[in-house]
Image: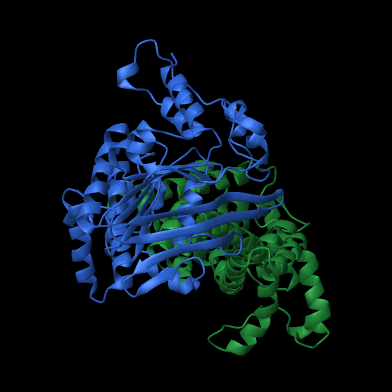
Chain colours: A blue, B green
Amino acid sequence: MTTNKPFLEVKNLNVAFPTEDGLVKASSDISFSVARGETLAVVGESGSGKSVTSLAVMGLHNRRSAQISGQAFLNLESGPVDVISADEEVVRKLRGKAMSMIFQDPMSALHPYYSIGNQLVEAWSLYNEGSAQDGKKRAIEMLDLVGIPAASKRVDEYPHQFSGGMRQRVMIAMALINNPSLLIADEPTTALDVTVQSQILKLIRDMQQEFNMALILITHDLGVVAEVADRVNVMYAGKIVESGSAEDIYYRPDHPYAIGLLNSIPRVDKLEDTRLVAIPGQPPSLIHLPQGCSFRARCEFADRVPGNLCATTTPSLDQKGADHFSRCHLPESELVKARVEIGGRK
Amino acid sequence: MLNYLARRLSATLVVLTLVSMSVFGIFAVLPMDPAALTCGKACYPAVIEANRHRLGLDVPVQVQYGRFVKGLFVGRNYGEGAASISCPAPAFGYSFNRHECVTSLIAEAFPVTLSLALGAFVLWISVGVGLGIVAARRRNQWPDRAATVFVLVGTSLPTFISGILILLFVGLKFHLIDPLNLGRWVSPLADPVAWFRTFIFPWIILALAYAASYTRFTRSNVIETSSEDYIRTARAKGLSEKVILQKHTLRAAVAPIVTLAGLDFAGLLGGAIITEQIFNLPGLGRLSIRAVLQDYDLPTIVATTILAATFVVVANLLVDIAYAYLDPRVRVA
């Protein structure tokens, strides 16, 4: 599935926001790629730089208020385009067509004053010639596809007449109406009822197959990740701290943060007497990042690294397996012990 | 929607009835005798009583109110026989001081106030909303700062200062205003140029304060709307900044401005007392202030008060209807 040429290649992407208190380094040194048909999950806690990175790819940061460096290539049929350095107008014309994005809160992501049909047709007519009737036909088709019952009737209704799950379906329909090659879903199920979450997730997967899209799924729900992801990027304090196949991350997590994350979710097979293990402490301020490893202050294995390396040197993203990278100084022997210790804790 | 309209319309009628009743009631309990006010210093009780009867003030207040309402619909006669005075519908009363039906006093004054309010409205909406949008789009840059200065000046200068300043140092100094013809009412149909010259300075003065607050209001509304999730969605779709501003941002930002504008305009229709006074405009404001301060002309005061209230109540209704049109969420509610 991942053998074809990646559609999106991000190389050394940095996004920072100057503020009165200093420069907020929201994401730094981000590199990854996604191919069509592939699903990349990005996990991490709030403020770890997940959304900031994808908004940069979409060109949705205000270039006046954000400092963005690095590259992000979209490999279009007409050749690669770097959306970071390209003209704003060029990037705008890629949005909705080559790449689309759906957001966390469908309750506020649709314009309350325009009908669903109006908003879908608006997106369609940006990249298609044709009458309003053609557009509406296409809109109904898309609503049908994402599972909105009585689409031809509901197309004239307004967002407030839809439930949260239905609105997220509408958002998906709108994002896909121009057949994009890349879909970025930024916590698409976080604001929804649990029962609806899995439906929406399944819908996104079905659509991915239907349209053969590259999918970036931003989430902090590791259950979701296990279900759908081909690859996983774990982010912490603006950096990718571990990257690998879903299997690598779940069965052979390398970074203490990733290990901690996995242990903070309840597991059906370990219910008895098990308390969920929280990672103590808070993520560091993105303005004053500590020297060395950003996770050091919360890491219980830092003292097992020889030479106080964690405090002095920022770990690089080193290869740990075939397609498995991690940013940690911990030697392999200590790592194996660490996995067992955390995993076996009651 | 029809249901909604019917409900709002009947509510409006109820409010209007209550307003007219309370205004009428307030003036009925005032410690002054309208009949005694009808004749000068040397007055015989017999004359007062005759006038009391003639004006229909010798019956209980609820009967007076009943006659007042009836007069609104069918017109009214004061006194009997050859000396009787007839005011055609809608009869708001008879001004004994000015020897005229109140309705004709209002009919004379209203076009003046309407001209003043309409021109000022157009001016302040275009300047205020326009400047607000520019300030929001160029936030923290020089256009925004310039708008802030304008807002500061506009809101802190009271009309009676700015009006006199412009009258003395612009209008009269540069001979743009003929002091003998100050405030002379000319119909815009008869002589549009003279009409424009009469009103241009009052418009500017009246619009200044409103434009300032509308600039501030529009600016903050546009900025707030710009950070809404649905604006980000519009951008993610690939829409151009121009379409996002015109179709998405303004549509949502303008709705509350419509409400405010409707009510402010209606408030002005009742008469802009200070501006009319400064520029000698014979509008409803002047009519009211003269009736209150000089003539103790109760029928005129009752009429202008009820009229002003009616404008506001009706504007409220129109604004609600406009809002339902603008915001689909209101339609079903």
Residue B42 pos. (x, y %): 78, 57
Q: From the viewer's perspective, is residue A300 above or below residue B138?
A: above
Residue A288 pos. (x, y %): 68, 43
Foreground: B141 or B323? B141
User: In this rendering, would B290 be left or right of A185?
Assistant: right
User: In this rendering, would B42 be left or right of B55?
Assistant: right
* The image quarter in which residue B110 lies: bottom right
The residue at the point 37 percent across, 23 percent down is: A266
Residue B77 pos. (x, y %): 49, 61
Q: Is residue B276 visible?
A: no
Q: Is residue B47 visible?
A: yes
The residue at the point 49 percent across, 61 percent down is: B254
Foreground: A97 or A324? A324
Foreground: A116 or B237? B237
The residue at the point 80 percent across, 71 percent down is: B164
User: In this rendering, would B250 be left or right of B153?
Assistant: left
Point out the image quarter for the C terminus of chain B.
top left
Foreground: A189 or B191? A189
The residue at the point 34 percent across, 22 percent down is: A267
